Amino acid sequence: MSDIAAFHTLLQRSPRILAICGAGLSASSGLPTFRGAGGLWRNYESTSLATPGAFGRDPALVWLFYAWRRHVCLQADPNGGHRALAALAKARGSDFLCLTQNVDNLHERAGHPPDTLRHLHGRLFDLKCSKCKKTAYTTDDPLCPALAPASKDFPAGDINPLLDPRSPVPPIPTAELPHCPSCGGIQRPGVVWFGENLDGRMLREVDAWIDAKPVDIVLVIGTSSVVYPAAGYAERARTRNTKVVTVNLDPDTEAAEPGDLVYVGDAAELLPALLAPLTTTSSL
Ligand code: APR
């Protein structure tokens, strides 16, 4: 594993940084990842919960899943990794851009400036009309009227029993699901589902930022790097001789390539140490 001092030396001569974040960044805050032990796609059937078809077939079941994920997110707190990235954003301003695959709101709750943060896969707290596609950004308040019908009090622990179609718990009545104030269609969670495109305008903005000036470091944090286009940014960086720095709990992560600086461990611990020269670690 590379030593922290090597990164500090690199950091001092690297004005422009791009970060790609995955579920591993929020793992220490208690949010499940997707593919590791206890991962969401290990425990739940993604095709019945995270696709447009699933929502068309049973919007109440899909809302139950996302309301539970929102509920778990609101029980969690940002960790040192979120705070280190927020401090890096404040230190570097427009020379830093954080692309997160995470739909939680922990970056924001760590104080990450919104102009240097892009949610590639949407946000748990945004609503989008399934009919007119209008996006209604909601507060993160679980009692927000638009979200209240789907924010049930969940039993501690697993909700698989609630998601089981044979569950004794009646699904949320369609009438109680959030409806679009403009067209009356049922609103859906504002996240990107399997088989859907990401926001094209956002992707063009990201490409423009990357192409505007050389990027010195790409930080690949807590992601398996198996989902595109998120996984493609580090690949592109390697062809441009940009230094890729991988932070991952798995010593055998496939997110790292030969030539990367690799830091094995918890992102919540490693990021404050790695970014210490640019951030006041005492506040992380
Ligand atoms: N610190 C650093 N890395 C961690 C930690 C941690 N505490 N815990 C887990 N990891 C690493 C795992 O080793 C793994 O490489 O984080 C990665 C998590 O990988 P995934 O579960 O595949 O999550 P992610 O890469 O974010 O998935 C990408 O897939 O299903 C879609 O939309 C979903 O955004 C998600 C995308």
Image (spheres, rainbow, N blue to C red):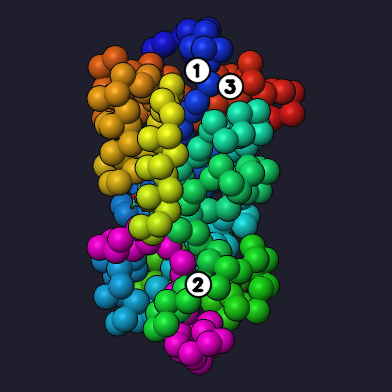
Image quarter of residue 35: top left
Task: Name the residue rendered at 53%, 53% in the picture.
Answer: 104
Query: Considering the numbered disc 1 on the image, is that residue within a helix, a strand or a loop?
Result: loop
Whole-number angstrom distance, CA of label 1 to CA of label 3: 12 Å
Task: Name the residue rendered at 62%, 57% in the picture.
Answer: 74
Q: Is residue 264 visible?
A: no
Q: Which residue is mark 3?
A: 275
Q: Are marks 1 and 2 in contact (CB under 8 Å)?
A: no
Q: Which residue is mark 1?
A: 14
177 part of magenta stretch: yes
Amino acid beneath label 3:
Leu
> What residue span does the magenta drawing correspond to?
171-198
Q: Which residue is mark 2?
A: 135
Q: For the residues carrying marks 2 and 3, which lies nearer the camera in this image? A: 2
Q: Quadrant of the N terminus?
A: top left
On the rendered structure, is 7 left or right of 139?
left
Q: For the residues carrying marks 1 and 3, which lies nearer the camera in this image? A: 1
